[in-house]
Image (cartoon, rainbow, N blue to C red):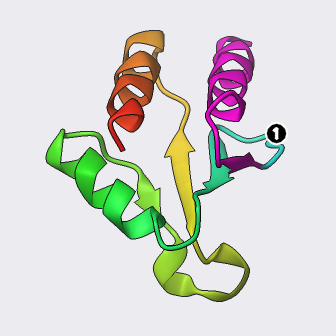
Amino acid sequence: QRVHADRAVLTAALQALPGLTVYPSAANFILFRTPPGQATPWFNQLKAQQILIKNLSPAGGLLQDCLRVTVGTPAENQAFLAALQGC
């Protein structure tokens, strides 16, 4: 239940960011599409801040420009969102 609630909060926060497409999820992760050509630079910026998510963009096709974040603790989710603001 906690993951479901935290996923809803994280999804809403991502949807509020301009330029992102957030896909519905029933899992413990959220898939989102960045503006064209931004997935890998954002992934690298987040990684430099010790925020580890999955870069799916190199797979190409339908996953081009997509990143995937696992729903974490509220503190981890807030750290991710704060770091994402700098991208």
Task: Kindly identify which residue carries mark 1.
Answer: 26
At x 61% / y 77%, what residue is drawn?
64
Report the front residue among 49 and 18.
18
- Seen as rendered, the residue at the extreme front is 18
Is 24 situated left or right of 36 in this image? right
Report the front residue among 63 and 4.
63
Q: Name the amino acid type tagged 1.
A: Ala
Instruction: Give the magenta-colored segment's residue range.
Output: 1-22
Residue 77 colored magenta?
no
Around disc 1, counting alpha carbons within 10 Å, would you say few (fewer than 14), some (14 to 19), or many (20 or more)? Answer: few
Q: Quadrant of the N terminus?
A: top right
Where disc 1 sits, the SS reads loop
Is 87 situated left or right of 19 in this image? left
At x 28% / y 40%, what residue is drawn?
51
Is 14 situated left or right of 44 in this image? right
Report the front residue among 48 and 19.
19
Q: Position of residue 12 (x, y in %)?
A: 72, 23
